[in-house]
Image (spheres, rainbow, N blue to C red):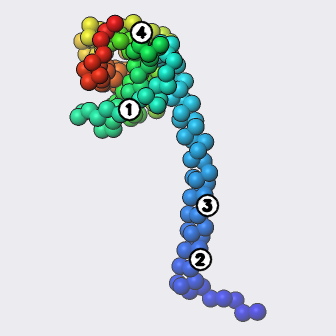
């Protein structure tokens, strides 16, 4: 039996067939994982809302909306919370691209008067054992029950009041920047919706 000669046309055809098969496989896998990924993102968001908001009886996700801010690349997500039809607070996302390893995304919960209830870290890629400590209780508790109008969200090295993570000042700055951004968005939200501090 005579061996087939390798020609440019044969090689291009084989490469095209392999690429087509790989592309179709990846597309199929992506399609079947879209719904589970969306459910996982929703569950993560709901968990964060339960951590940063006071008790609520509405659906903050369906009541939420996006706020476009000039200094923010993507829109800021706002999730209002109501208890017995009375505004109880809001959870707002804050983002900084200035982390040591890039993106730091938070969800910050605010009382009606603007005081911070709690903060949940949604995304971060900081150095394990250093910047990742931003999710720790010791670091987060310095923000709780603080009002950004009177508590300077800058790191102490920069003249603010935030005690930086040891060896992770850049990560702390990004965290503080994202928190300040969330507060700024909250002030805009309150003004647009005529929400009082009560």
State the CA–CA distance, disc 3 to disc 4: 48 Å
Asked if disc 4 and disc 1 are in contact, CB closer than 8 Å, the reply is no
Give me the residue at 59% from left, 74% from top: 17
Where residue 5 sits, quadrant-wise, is bottom right
Query: Disc 1 on helix, strand or loop?
Result: strand
In 3D space, how far apart are the residues under numbered discs 4 and 2 (Cα atoms)? 61 Å
Check disc 3 and report the residue beneath it: 25
Q: Which mark is residue 65?
A: 1
The residue shown at (43%, 28%) is 63
> Which residue is disc 4 drawn over?
144
Closer to the camera: disc 4 or disc 2? 4
Of label 3 and label 4, which has the lower sequence position?
Answer: 3
User: Of the numbered discs in the image, which one, if any, rests on residue 14?
Assistant: 2
Above or below, comparing residue 90 to residue 43 in the picture: above
Kindly report which numbered mark, 3 or 2, lies closer to the viewer in this rendering: 3
Q: Quadrant of the C terminus?
A: top left
Residue shown at 31%/9% (left/top)? 197
């Amino acid at each position: 039996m005579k061996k087939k000669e390798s020609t440019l046309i044969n090689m291009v055809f084989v490469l095209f067939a392999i690429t087509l098969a790989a592309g179709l496989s990846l597309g199929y896998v992506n399609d079947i994982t879209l719904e589970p990924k969306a459910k996982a993102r929703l569950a993560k968001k709901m968990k964060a809302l339960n951590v940063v908001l006071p008790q609520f009886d509405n659906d903050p996700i369906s009541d939420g909306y996006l706020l476009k801010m000039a200094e923010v690349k993507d829109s800021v997500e706002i999730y209002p919370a109501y208890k017995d039809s009375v505004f109880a607070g809001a959870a707002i996302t804050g983002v900084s691209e200035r982390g040591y390893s890039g993106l730091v995304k938070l969800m910050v919960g605010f009382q009606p008067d603007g005081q911070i209830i709690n903060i949940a870290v949604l995304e971060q890629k900081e150095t394990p054992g250093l910047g990742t400590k931003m999710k720790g209780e010791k670091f987060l508790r310095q923000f709780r029950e603080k009002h950004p109008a009177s508590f300077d969200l800058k790191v102490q090295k920069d003249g603010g009041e935030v005690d930086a993570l040891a060896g992770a000042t850049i990560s702390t700055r990004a965290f503080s920047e994202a928190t300040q951004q969330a507060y700024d968005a909250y002030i805009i939200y309150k003004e647009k919706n005529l929400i009082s501090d009560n």
